[in-house]
Amino acid sequence: MGSEMKAGPMRVLVTGGSGLVGKAIEHVVEQEGGKLEGEEWIFLSSKEADLVDAGQTRAVFKKYRPTHVIHLAAKVGGLYLHMKENLHFLRDNLKINDNVLQTAHETGVTKVVSCLSSCIFPDKTTYPIDEKMMHNGPPHDSNFGYSHAKRMIDVQNRAYFQQYGHRYTAVIPTNVFGPYDNFSIENGHVLSALVHKTHKAKMEGTHVHVCGSGDPRRQFIYSLDLGRLIIWVLREYEEIEPIILSVGEEDEISIKEAVDMIAEALDFQGKILFDSSQSDGQVKKTASNSKLRRYLPDLTFTPLKEAIKMTCDWFIANYDIART
Ligand code: NAP
Ligand code: GDP
C-alpha cells in the first residue's frame, strides 16, 4: 500500500453498490470482517445518484467525501441486450466513467479501482489473452459500444497518472455470477438467464431453450470470490495497468457444460434444447490469470458447481426480490 493510503482510515465509495458485484463486496465487508477499524464503506445505487449526470455525480461525492472509490456502476447486460443497444452502452458508460473519474480527481480521491471486462479484449487474437493485449485490435462486434467505453477507462487512468500522478487503476473480471445478479431471461447474462429459464421450465414442466449452439466457452468467476479480490486490489495493488481477475484457463467451460451444471443444481430432468439460429457471440475470450497468480500464488476459487448451487439456492429463496 502507498504511504498516502496509510494516512488514515479509508472512506470508500462503491458506485454500483446495489448490483451483483457491489452486493458481493458489501457481503465481504459487512459479513466476512473485510472492514478495518475506522473505515467507512458507502454502497451507492442509481436511486441516490444518476452518474450519467455530472451534477448528481459531484453532489454525491460532496456528500460522502470518499478517500477511495471502487467504481462498478455501468450500464450492464447480456449479449442479446448489447446487440440491440450498442449506442446506449457506449454513451451511458462513457459519461458515467468520465463523471466518476474526473470528480474523483477534482475532489482529491487517493485511489480509484474501476471495473473493465474480458469481453472488451480484441476479437481476433491469440490465446490466452493478457493485460497487455487490451488495445490490440477491435473488440467483438456484438458489444463494441460497451467495449470501447470500457477501454477508455484504461486510457484515462494512464492519463491521470501521467498528468497528476494519480493511482487510478482497473480490474478485468471474466463472466461473473452469484446472488443479486440480474436474472432477466431476456437481458441477463448467460448464467443468470439460464438459472431463471431452468427454474421456470421445471415449475411449468417445459423444456429449457438455450440461445446459440452451446459451444462457446467462458471462464466464470463467483461474485464473492471477485469481491474479495477487488478489496485486495484496493488495499494492495499499486499498478496503473489493469489486472485480470479470473479463474484459470483450465477452468474455462462450454455453455453446454454450464447449463448441465445448472440443471443438476436445480434437479431439472426435462429436455435442454439449443437454438443455433441465435448468435453465439464471442466463441471464447480465454484470459490468463498469471499476473494475479504471481501476486497471490496460493489463491483458490470456490468450485464452480458449488458456486452455481449456492446461486440457484439464493435465486429460489429470494425469488420475490430477485431482479427478473
Ligand atoms: P449489475 O448487477 O447490473 O449492477 C450495475 C450497478 O450499476 C447497479 O448498482 C446499478 O444501480 C448501477 N448503475 C447502473 N447505471 C447507473 C447510473 N446511471 N448511475 C448510477 N449507478 C448506475 O452489474 P454488475 O454485474 O454488478 O457489474 C458491475 C461492474 O462489473 C460493471 O462495471 C460491469 O461492467 C463489470 N463486469 C460485470 C461482469 C458480469 O458478468 N456481470 C463481467 C465483467 C465485468 P441500480 O441497480 O441501483 O440501478
Ligand atoms: P458474453 O460472455 O459477454 O458473450 O455475455 P453473456 O453472459 O450474455 O453470454 C453469452 C453466451 O451465452 C453466448 O454464447 C450465448 O449464445 C450463450 N447463451 C445461451 N443462452 C443464453 C441466454 O439465455 N442468455 C444469454 N445472455 N446468453 C446465452
Image: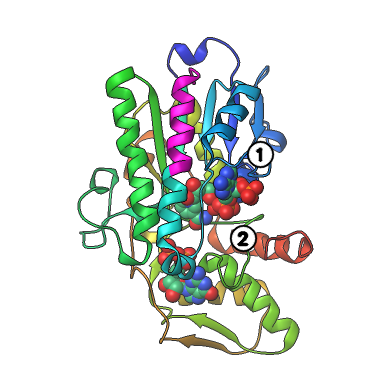
- Would residue 123 be counted in the magenta stretch? no
Q: Residues within 10 Å of mark 1 (few under 14, many from 20)?
A: many
- Between the C-alphas of marks 1 and 2, the distance is 17 Å
Q: In the shown orientation, is residue 147 left or right of residue 56?
A: left
Callout 2 amino acid: Asn
Residue under the image location 71 percent in, 35 percent down? 30
Residue under the image location 64 percent in, 24 percent down? 64
The answer to whether residue 245 is above or below residue 35 is below
- Would residue 101 be counted in the magenta stretch? yes
Q: In the shown orientation, is residue 126 left or right of residue 257?
A: left
How far across and how far down the image is residue 43, in percent? 65, 36
Q: In the shown orientation, is residue 75 left or right of residue 152?
A: right
How far across and how far down the image is residue 86, in percent? 40, 61
Q: Are marks 1 and 2 in contact (CB under 8 Å)?
A: no
Q: Is mark 2 within 8 Å of ligand 1?
A: yes
Q: In the shown orientation, is residue 229 left or right of residue 132?
A: right
What is the secondary structure assignment of the residue under circle 2? loop
Callout 1 amino acid: Glu
Query: Image quadrant for the C terminus?
Result: bottom right
How far across and how far down the image is residue 285, in percent? 33, 61
Residue under the image location 24 percent in, 58 percent down? 127
Q: Nearer the viewer, mark 1 or mark 2?
A: 2
Residue stretch rendered in magenta on the structure:
95-109
Name the residue nearer the viewer: 186 or 173.
186
What residue did someone put label 1 on? 26
Of the numbered discs 1 and 2, the one sitting upstream in the chain is 1
The number of numbered badges drawn on the structure is 2
Name the residue nearer the viewer: 69 or 292.
69
What residue did someone put label 2 on? 182
